[in-house]
Image (cartoon, rainbow, N blue to C red):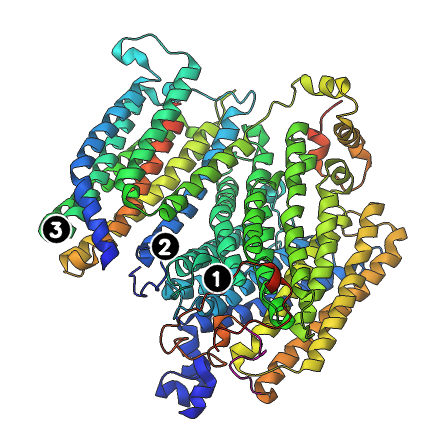
Amino acid sequence: MSQSDAMGFLSPLTEKAENSWFWYIKEWVCSTDAKRIGLMYIIFGILMGVIGGVLSILIRIELFSAGADIMSETFYATLPGMHATLMIFFFVIPIFTGVGNFVVPIQIGAPDMAFPRLNLAGFWILPAAAAMALSAYLVPKGAPGFGWTGYPPLSVQASLGADLWIAAIILVGTSSTMAAVNFLSTVFNMRCKNMTLFQMPLFTWSLVVTSFLILASTPVLTSAMMMLELQRTFPAAFHFFDPQGGGDPILYQHLFWFYSHPAVYIMILPGFGLISEVIPTFSRKPIFGYAVMAWSMIAIAVLGFVVWAHHMFTTGIALRVRMAFMLLTMLIAVPTGIKIFSWLATMWGGSLSFKTPMLFAVGFIAMFTIGGLSGVVLASVPVDIQLHDTYYVVAHIHYVLVAGSVMTIWAGIYYWWPKMTGRFYHEGLGKFHFWVTTIFINVTFFIQHYLGMQGMPRRYFDYDPQFEWANAISSLGSFALFSVQFVALGNLVWSLYAGRQAEANAWEDGETLEWDISSPPPHHNFPEPPVWEPVDRSHDEEEGHELQPQPSPAE
Amino acid sequence: MAHEQKTFLGIDFLYSTYMYVWVALLVLTVVEVIVPEPSLIGLSAFPRWVVVLSLIMLALGKTFMVAWYYMHLIDERPSIIGIACAPFIFSVFLTIGLWPHRAQMPEEPTSSNQQPAAESVERAAADGASDEPSSAGMTLAADSLSQSK
Amino acid sequence: MAAQVEAGAENLGVENGKIGMWTFLVMDAMTFAGFLAGYARLRWSPGSGWPMPYETFGVIGIQLTAFNTFVLICSSVSMVHVLAETMKGNLKRAENWMLATIFGGLFFLGVQGYEWTHLIMDKWPHMLSAGAAPPAYNSNFASTFLNLTGFHGAHVAVGVMYNVIMYLGLRRGKIDQDNASLIEIAGLYWHFVDLIWILVFTFVYLI
C-alpha cells in the first residue's frame, strides 16, 4: 500500500494490472485520467519529434554539399513538408496539450478535466492521424512533395499521398479542437475556491488563450482542406482553387494562413506561460506584472488573428492591404516585448538558482528575442519581398520554433518531471544538454540568416556551390543538435530507475497548487477539494523590490 | 442546484414568447423570399444594393432571434454571450480579409506619385515588386500576379 | 456527453456540458465561416460572371427551399417544446414533440436530396462528367452551392441522430426532469443548425 502511495497515479488501479504488464498497459490505454493522458501525449510527441528529427537530418545530409548526394529529387521534395507536418502537428502541439493535461487540472484545483472520455478520444485520434500521414510514404508515388502549406495547384495535382496527408490534417484539427473544448470547459467551470480568473497561474492562462486560438482558427484550416479534397476527388465538379473554372488559388492561401499564423501562437503561447512558471520559482520572487502578462497574451492572440496576410506579401494583394498587415504584424512585437521585459524584471533582484529548467528559460528568452527580431524584419513589406521563401525565413521559423517552442518544452519537461514521475533527473547531464543544445541551435540556424540574405531559396534540392561552406556548418550543427537530444531522453529514462526521490514541493519554491500534493500526484489529484489562498497580484513598490519569496499557499 | 433553477424560470418566461418569435421568423422568411423577386406580389424590382443590404439585415435579425430566444442567450451569463459572439466577430473579419480587391484600379500609381515622401515605403515595396522575377526563390504566384507598373 | 464531472467552486454557473457545447459551436461556426468567406471571395471577384440564383433555381425551386426553411424553423420550435415539457415533467408530451423534431429534420433532408438530384441531373450534368460545362458559366456557383448545403446537410443528419438518441433516452426513462440539461444541450446544437441554415439560405439562394 505504501509503495502504491509513493507511485501516485502511476500505480495500477486493479489487482489484475498489478500482476501483469499487459493489463497495466491496457489500463493506461483506456485511462481517462488527465495525468495519464498527458503523459501519453508527451511520449507520443517525443516519438514523433524523433521521426521528424530524422527527416530533418536527411535534409541536412542532402544539403551538406552541393549536387545530388544520397537521394532523388522527388524524395527530397517530400522531406520539408513532412518534417514540418510532423513537428508542428504531431510534436509541438500535442506535447503542449500533454503538459497542459497534466498540469492545468492540478493548477486550478480540479480532480480531472471536464470531459475525461472526450480527452481520451482526442488523444487516440492522434496516432491514427500520424499513421495516415506517415503511410503516405508507402503508397505509390510516395508522400506529397508540396511542403506543409499544400498550396494549389501543386496539391491538386499531387498523387494519392496527398489525400492521406489531407485526411491526417483534418484529423489532427479535430483532435486539437476536442482538447481545446475540454481545456476551456475545465478552466471556466472547475476552478477551486478562490481561484478567480485573475488568480490563475499564468500557464493555465496561456492554455485558455491557446484554446481560444485553436477553436477559432483550426476549423478554417479544416474547411480549406475539405475544399481541397473535394477538388481533388471530383475534379469535374469542384473548381474552388482552379482559375480555369473560375476559382482562385489565393483563396486557399488566405484560408490556410488564417489558421497557420495563429498556429504559430498556438505553438508558442503555452511556452510563454510555462516560462512564466519556471522563472518565478527559480528567482524565488512572484512574477512581475501578473495582470499585464495575462493581458499581453490575450493581445498577442487577438493580434495573431489579424496578421495572416504577411505570409502572402508576394501574392499580389493590394499594397494598401499589405501596409495594413505590415503595421499590425509589427504591433505584435509590443506585447511580446512586454512579456520579455516582465520576465527579466522578475529575475531582477531575485535570488536566482540556475537549475536546468531555469537555464532553458533564460536561454529561451535570449534566443527567442533573436527570432522575434528577425520576425519584425520579415514583417516589413519591402524586405519580405526580397527575403520571401529564402533561408532567412527558415532561420526565422527555427529560431522561433526550436529556440522558442522546443526549448520551452524542455524547460517544462525538466520542471515538471519530478512532479510527473516523482524522480529527479541527473542535473549535470541536464546542464550539459542545455549548453550543447543552445550552442548548436545557433550553429545550425544562425548561418541560415546569411544564406537567406545571399538568396538561397528554401525547399530546394540543390544550390549554388558558393553556399557550400555555410551549408556544411549548418548540417554539422544539426547533427550535433539532434544527437544531444538522445542524451536528454536517456537522462529521463535513467531517472526512472536511479533518480533521486522528489518531495511534494520538488523545487522548494513552487507556489502553485501542483506543488502542494505528493510527487507523483495521487489518482484524483487532491484528497479533498483544495482552497486557494489568494495572492496579492498587484505590484506595489515594496513588493516589487522584495527579495524574500512570498510564503507559499501551502504553508 | 441553484443555477439550474434559474434556467427553469427563464424557460417559463420564454414559453409565451417563443411562439411570437416563431411567427416573426416565418414572416421574415416570407419577406426574404419576396425581396429579391418583388414581382411575386406585383412590385417592380428593387435596386441591387437594397436587395443585398436588406437580405443581410434580415438574415442577421433572424439569426439573432434564434440565438437569443431559442438558444436561451437571453437567460445566459455574459460570459456565455461572449463565447457566442466570438465566432461572429472572427468570421466578419475573415470575410473582410478575404474580400477580393480590384487589382486593376488605376489609383495606386497616382497616389504614390503624389506623395513621394510619405509613400516612400510603398515605393520601395513597388520597386521590390518589379524586381521580383530576377530575385531567387520567388513563388510562381508572385511572378504572375505582382502588380505591373 | 453526460456532465459526469461536477463543476468546481468557482464556475460560470452552468453545467460543464453547456460550456462544452457552446465552445464546440464556436468551432463549428468557424468552419462554416471558412466556407462562407470563401464563397464570398469567389462570388465577388471582379468578373466572376456569377449567375443569379433566381435564374438557376427558378421561382418554384426557391419557394420549395423556403418551405424547407419553414420546416426547419418549425422543428426548432418543437425542440424548445421538448425542453419545456421535459422540465415540467410531461415526458410523454416531450417524446411526441421530439418525434416531431426528428420528422422535421428528416423531411428537410428528403427535400434537399430531391433538390440535389434535380439540380445535378438537369442543370449541372457536367458535374458527373456527363457533358461539358456550359460556356462562360461559372461552375463555382454549383461547387459552392453543393459544398455549403452538403456540409449543412451533414450537420442536419448528425442532429437527427443526436435527437434520436435523446428520444430513446426519454423513452427509456434515462432523461427526465432532473437531467433536462441534456435536452437543452442537444437543443443548442439543433438550433445552431437552424441558425446556420438561415444564413446559408440567404446567402446562397436569395442574394
* A165 is higher (above) or lower (below) than C103: below
Name the residue type under label 2: Gly
* A506 is higher (above) or lower (below) than B46: below
Residue highlighted by disc 3: C88
- Of marks 3 and 2, which one's residue comes earlier in the chain? 2
Residue highlighted by disc 2: C20
**In magenta stretch: residue B147:** no
Camera-nearest residue between A258 and A8: A8
Q: Are marks 3 and 2 on the same chain?
A: yes
Across and down, in percent, residue A312 comes to 66, 38
Q: Are marks 3 and 1 on the same chain?
A: no
Across and down, in percent, residue C14 comes to 30, 55
> Magenta region: which residues?
A501-510
How far is mark 2 from mark 1, CA to CA?
Answer: 20 Å
Across and down, in percent, residue A156 comes to 58, 42
Look at the image and tell me in which quarter the N terminus of chain B lies: bottom left
User: Residue drawn 78% across and 67% down?
Assistant: A439
Residue highlighted by disc 1: A200
Q: Would residue A332 be seen by someone viewing this image from the given angle?
A: yes
